[in-house]
Amino acid sequence: MNKMNKHWLALICGAALFAATSLNAADKKSYQVTGPVLEMTPTTITVQKGNDRWELARDSRTKITGDLKVGSKVTIYYTMVAVEVEVKPAKQPKADKDTK
């Protein structure tokens, strides 16, 4: 009986861990941009959206479906992820000159 309880506990812990990682992945907001490709490099794709040029980074993990070339109309799905956060010290309030 004790061995059976350990198996159930392991199964419940595994399910809870799976659920927690799934919920965390859902927190990341995704966006998309659609338009013709203006330029491509191994690390960027530049797309025209209205009057704006959007330059998006890409790497070896970027999934490309179809024949990507300049002039192709594409929809790019992307996320915005902070790479570094620098916290600035708070400014000290100026001393009131009338308190003398």
Image: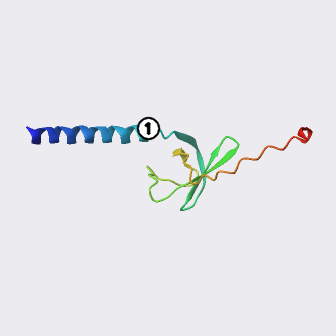
Location of the N terminus by quadrant is top left
Closer to the camera in the image, 65 or 27: 27
Count up the numbered dots: 1
Residue furthest toward the left? Answer: 1
* Number of residues whose C-alpha sits closer than 10 Å to that of mark 1, classed few (under 14), some (14–19) or many (20 or more): few
Residue tagged 1? 26
| Image position of 4 (left or right of 98) | left
Residue 51, how many percent across, how many down? 70, 43
Closer to the camera in the image, 31 or 68: 31
Residue 75, how many percent across, how many down? 53, 43
| Circle 1 SS class | helix
Residue furthest toward the bottom? Answer: 42
The quadrant holding residue 26 is top left
At a point 10% along the width and 42% down the height, the residue shown is 3
Residue 19 sits above or below residue 39 on the image:
above
| Image position of 55 (left or right of 67) | right
Residue 29, how many percent across, how many down? 51, 39
Location of the C terminus by quadrant is top right
At a point 45% along the width and 59% down the height, the residue shown is 60
Closer to the camera in the image, 68 or 4: 4
Residue 10, how many percent across, how many down? 21, 42
How are the residues colored? rainbow
At a point 67% along the width and 40% down the height, the residue shown is 50
Q: Amino acid at mark 1?
A: Ala
